[in-house]
Image (cartoon, rainbow, N blue to C red):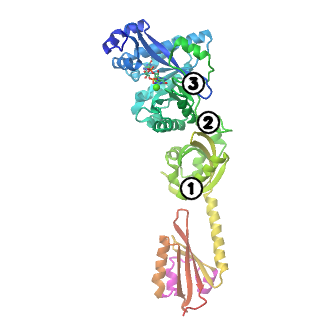
Amino acid sequence: MYRVMTEEEMLEGFEAAIADEQFYVCYQPQINHMSGRIVGAEALIRWKSPEFGVQFPGDFIPVLERNNLIYRADLFVFEAVCRMIRKCLDEGISIVPISVNMSRYDIIDHDYVGDIEKIRKKYNVPIKLLRIEITESTAIGGSSLMMSILDRLHVCGYMVEMDDFGSGYSSLNILKDLDVDVIKLDMSFLSENVGGRGGVIISSMVQMTKWLNTPVIAEGVETVEQADYMQSLGCNYIQGYLYSKPVPEEEFLKLMQKMDQEPIKPAISIAKGMGAGSFWDPDSFETLIFNDFVGAAAIFSYEDGKVEILRVNKKYLEEVGMNLTEQEVLNSNPWDNHSENSRKIYEDTMLRAIESGEEESCEHWRHIHSRCCGDDHICVRAHIRMIGNAGKQYIMYARIRNITKEKRLFNAVVDSEKRFRYASEQANVYAWEYDIAKREMHPCFRCMRDLGLPMLVKNYPEPAIEMGIFPPDYADMYRDWHRQLEQGVEKLEAVIPLTVGRVPFIVRYTTEFDENGKPYKAYGSATLVVDNPV
Ligand code: C2E
Ligand code: CA
Ligand code: CA
């Protein structure tokens, strides 16, 4: 009678199953949904017992894992795959890379990498035709064992796939720690409702992988809607019943030969003029250009108001100054460095760049914090351009120039112009400039001539009070004005009888604020009251 075997029956039958080839391998193709080409296939173990019929991996794999037999089974699959590839190579059949599953138990008390390498060499299979699938749960906890296995696989030259990504708890952390080459997303998260909650999870998963520029294979894709949805997210690689169930070797080889082949590539679509995702490859031509030819530049992603810096070049760090490290820049939330106003300027420019597809520019002030230099404000001119997008996520490129010095100089010119205007516009006006932080007063020429003030009056307003310019009954009020200036009052005005003659003047202060909104200068004036109030 065909039925699911009990654990005892499985353990009893295991040796015979290996020897009699009750175990065999099925292959499920992986397809680029956009081009229709085949990019690879996954090898999946099958057990057909003459007595109990087909057993499902979901039933027998856990039994083999519990009983320390999975290693034999996995090496059996690996060898079957190598044998098949060898056959193809010998017969001149062009073959795609095959993914083989590694159980997390395979690395405990076994020399997994050493053993598969022996098998690979026995069949003389080029390493680029083999990929190893590890599961997220194997990698959880940043297991140092897993990391060292991953390193060894990479040193040998294997491509490594992260299977069932997103099914575990700490997906993002794992991606940061483990440098895998391909990520497999299980569509069971998506269930039936494309665009529903499952859709949100899937799309954010795909985005996370985009940041790492790691290609994604969507697994378990059963419908065209699901495949189209994944494609709309920029994820084109599909493995699922939509294209084919896992099929026995012979059938797979027939199917594969009917199809065009292509290799798996990183997923971000880079806009016109920019080479494919090689921005992330430290040895690429694009990286060389990025570092050596383009000046200070950054690449960042933008989606729904959220910005994440992905790369900055050396000149960017130099331009911003403050001795920042690349890591400090990447770890910071860029919006934290912007006031509401400057964020709006920057975001509007970015949206314009997305809309127009052209370079758009803006100037804005940023707050910079570095562990070694503390805090500063800098004025930045940015030229922003979109270089690619994946769905609603945009990849942006910004060239920047630190124009703080020019900007301050410019402001100073505006200041002196303003001073000149104040002084010349009004006759009978005494004007002065008050440096709030230093409590220094710079009088106009008329003040110096008529009132005998020096070019710079320190500890203002005390000397003016002492000299009797401000009469004693107004001294406290006038002192209080200067406290208010320090606190950021914008305007002050009163009629004050000045000098020993107690001639009434309208005395005014207008405060100037720096880019932080801190008061730094006040312009004072005293205008003769022509119509003497009675
Ligand atoms: P997996 O590695 O995630 O393999 C994908 C599973 O999804 C396969 O189930 C495949 O048949 C199934 N599948 C593919 N497309 C679709 C689809 O469109 N819809 C649905 N509902 N399912 C689809 P399978 O072959 O039953 O394998 C189950 C699991 O058993 C595998 O999950 C893997 O964890 C394990 N397994 C299979 N072969 C091996 C092996 O050789 N070694 C080890 N260690 N584990 C294996
Ligand atoms: Ca797998
Ligand atoms: Ca899977």
**Does label 1 or label 3 sit earlier along the sequence?**
3
Q: What amino acid type should be assigned to the residue bearing mark 3?
A: Ile
Nearer to me, 293 or 146: 146
The answer to if 252 sits in the magenta stretch is: no
Label 3–label 2 contact, CB within 8 A? no
How many other residues sit within 10 Å of disc 2, few (<14), some (14-19) or many (≥20)?
Answer: some
**Place of residue 455 in the rendered image (x, y in percent of width and height, measured from the top left):** 60, 78
Residue 465 colored in magenta in the image: yes
Range covered by the magenta-colored residues = 445-471
The disc label shown at residue 294, or none: none
Query: Which residue in the structure is indicated by mark 2?
Result: 269
Which kind of residue does numbered mark 2 sit on? Answer: Ser
Compared with residue 425, is residue 272 higher up or lower down, i.e. above or below?
Answer: above
Closer to us: 215 or 119: 215
Q: Where is ligand 1, by quadrant?
A: top left
The residue to which callout 3 is attached is 31
SS for callout 1: helix
Badge 3 element:
strand
